[in-house]
Image: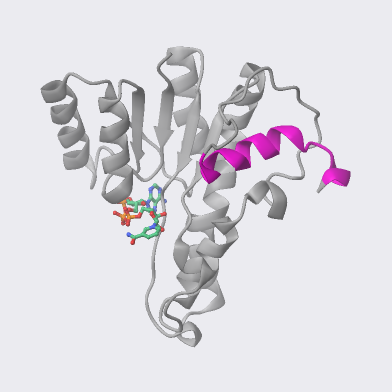
Amino acid sequence: MKDVIIITGASSGFGALAARALARAGHTVYASMRETAGRNAPQVAEAQKYAAKHNVDLRTIDLDVASEASADAAIEAIVTAHGRLDVVIHNAGHMVFGPAEAFTPEQFAELYDVNVLSTQRVNRAALPQLRRQGQGLVIWVSSSSSAGGTPPYLAPYFAAKAALGRPPTRHGLLNTTPAPMRVSRTRCSKGSSPSCRPMRMSLQSRTPSSR
Ligand SMILES: NC(=O)c1ccc[n+]([C@@H]2O[C@H](COP(=O)([O-])OP(=O)(O)OC[C@H]3O[C@@H](n4cnc5c(N)ncnc54)[C@H](OP(=O)(O)O)[C@@H]3O)[C@@H](O)[C@H]2O)c1
């Protein structure tokens, strides 16, 4: 069965490429991006052109990951249209460059908001539907740089990515979810890629005591 997939920050880079590749693989893909009627209108047009040319189900939807209302509206629109949502890919991110001490705490907070907290906004909109379905896959795009890179100039970015570098279910973002859940089927199997693990773990470790 083909999946309904949403990718955040898919106006450019990995997000745009992944959206096209997954659509070519036959999935229904929502390349979500902010400012679809403004700055990213050309990216919307490009995606539409690509979909028509390759006869694939590549769509765009407005989603600013910095806005809870925007995340709620995008996920609701997808679930209303399809009755399900199978895969959420947290790809939106922002890199900054400069010596760590040059950034104000407020700038750090903004960086963490886009790179880390934004995923919780989207999860809070999407996970109730995945729980209703009893299955789903959530992928966080981190960075290998969080395991060692070229500080100090990328230290703020690396630090933010490090927050996603391990399954958030084990390290803070999802482990406050209290309701037990039974999974009828999981997409992750023995030998699955590491990106399968976070969701399976989040579905299985429901109680605060299992953190
Ligand atoms: N490139 C690398 O070497 C590398 C390595 C490891 C990990 N990554 C990670 O891979 C992901 C994609 O990066 P990329 O290299 O493809 O860079 P990119 O082309 O700059 O993509 C980042 C995307 O995030 C979007 N974004 C930023 N703030 C947003 C917001 N508030 N709401 C919605 N979208 C927002 C940007 O959209 P706008 O166009 O609207 O700004 C852009 O489409 C990031 O998470 C990045 O940290 C990249």
Left or right position of 61 against 206: left
Q: Visible in this render: residue 107?
A: no
Vertical arrangement, residue 200 with respect to residue 121, above or below:
above
Residue 124, quarter of picture: top right
Left or right of residue 54: residue 3: right
What secondary structure is the magenta-colored segment mainly? helix
Q: Is residue 129 above or below residue 120?
A: above
Q: Residue 44, percent across and down?
A: 22, 35
- The answer to if 105 sits in the magenta stretch is no
Q: Where residue 19 sits in the image (x, y, percent)?
A: 31, 35
Residue 114, percent from left and from top: 48, 56
Magenta-drawn segment: 193-210
Q: Residue at x 28, y 38 (%)?
A: 36
Q: Residue placed at 59% from the left, 45% from the top?
A: 120
Quadrant of the rendering where the N terminus is positioned: top left
Frontmost residue, 140 versus 1: 1
User: Is-magenta flag for residue 208?
Assistant: yes
Q: Position of residue 164 (x, y in %)?
A: 56, 56
The part of the image, by quadrant, that contains residue 122 is: top right
Check the image and report above or below for 102 versus 123.
below
Ligand 1 found in image quarter: bottom left
